[in-house]
Image: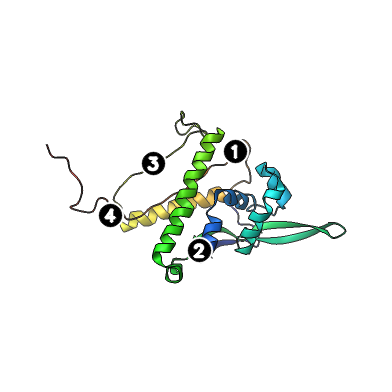
């Protein structure tokens, strides 16, 4: 059953370009995932990710600075040494469309495309090179790459239903059981946009 942890908002708005660049990064998204269900220290997250904890201080500082995570508890370890427990500030982070007025529409679009699509491409490439992704497999094999692009027609009602269903699926996965047995990380990127590729009367046809 999906639950929202105490003190965590369901949604928070991303309103500046620096925050967008910080958030849409595969490594930082993995950190955020580990801080959804319960507060954790940098050392605990490092153990879960299998990386040295010293590599995460910079990432945690960035995430905290831009409001994606916060310290919810501090424990004394002895002397002046303190151990901080972090948790996300929200389950979902949504782009503030009004930010186009402060940073410009072109810059906002370039930032989104670079942060989401370029980072996704690099993450897929690294996954392939590390052997996690197997190009010889097909979905739903756990090592397969699912990649599809299509053009289809939707009514406003169908679009609204699709958006609602997709949001519900994502929310259920994010707030579901923490680190279920026999699970692994999967990257997920989705884009849906009105396309100029096949407007009425402009579709390409083959003439013989």
Q: In the image, which disc is placed on residue 196?
A: 4
Q: Is residue 140 left or right of residue 31?
A: left
Q: Which residue is mark 2?
A: 17
Q: Comparing marks 2 and 1, which lies closer to the viewer?
A: 2
- How many residues crowd around disc 2 within 10 Å: few (fewer than 14), some, or many (20 or more)? some
Horizontal and vertical percent position of residue 113: 43, 54
Kindly identify the residue that appears in the image at 65 percent across and 43 percent down. 49
Q: Is residue 151 left or right of residue 88?
A: left
Q: In the image, which disc is placed on residue 51?
A: none
Q: Which residue is mark 1?
A: 183
Q: Earlier in the sequence, mark 4 or mark 1?
A: 1
Q: Earlier in the sequence, mark 2 or mark 1?
A: 2
Horizontal and vertical percent position of residue 184: 59, 39
- How many residues crowd around disc 4 within 10 Å: few (fewer than 14), some, or many (20 or more)? few
**Looking at the image, which is closer to me, 14 or 178?**
14
> Is 7 drawn above or below residue 47 in the view shown?
below
In terms of secondary structure, where does tag 2 sit?
helix
**Looking at the image, which is closer to me, 158 or 131?**
131
Q: Comparing marks 2 and 3, which lies closer to the viewer?
A: 2
Q: Earlier in the sequence, mark 3 or mark 4?
A: 3
Q: Quadrant of the C terminus?
A: top left
Q: In the image, which disc is placed on residue 148?
A: 3
- How many residues crowd around disc 3 within 10 Å: few (fewer than 14), some, or many (20 or more)? few
Q: Label 1 near label 4: C-beta < 8 Å?
A: no
- The Cα atoms of the two marked residues, 4 and 1, are separated by 39 Å
> Is 84 drawn above or below residue 146 in the view shown?
below
Q: Comparing marks 1 and 3, which lies closer to the viewer?
A: 3
Kindly identify the residue that appears in the image at 52 percent across and 58 percent down. 21
> Is 118 drawn above or below residue 107 in the view shown?
above
Furthest toward the top, the residue is 136
- The Cα atoms of the two marked residues, 3 and 4, are separated by 19 Å
């Amino acid at each position: 059953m999906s639950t929202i942890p105490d003190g965590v908002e369901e949604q928070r708005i991303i309103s500046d370009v620096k925050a967008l660049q910080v958030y849409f990064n595969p490594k930082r998204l993995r950190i955020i995932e580990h801080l959804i269900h319960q507060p954790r220290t940098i050392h605990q997250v490092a153990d879960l990710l299998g990386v040295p904890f010293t590599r995460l201080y910079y990432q945690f500082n960035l995430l905290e600075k831009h409001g994606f995570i916060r310290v919810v508890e501090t424990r004394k370890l002895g002397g002046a040494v303190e151990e901080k427990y972090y948790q996300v500030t929200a389950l979902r982070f949504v782009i503030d469309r009004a930010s186009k007025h402060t940073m410009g529409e072109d810059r906002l679009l370039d930032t989104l495309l670079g942060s989401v699509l370029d980072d996704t491409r690099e993450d897929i490439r690294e996954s392939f090179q590390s052997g996690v992704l197997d190009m010889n497999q097909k979905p739903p094999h756990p090592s397969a790459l699912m990649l599809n692009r299509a053009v289809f027609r939707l009514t406003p009602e169908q679009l609204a239903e699709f958006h609602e269903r997709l949001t519900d699926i994502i929310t259920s996965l994010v707030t579901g059981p923490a680190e279920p047995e026999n699970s692994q990380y999967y990257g997920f990127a989705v884009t849906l946009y009105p396309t100029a590729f096949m407007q009425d009367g402009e579709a390409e046809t083959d003439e013989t």
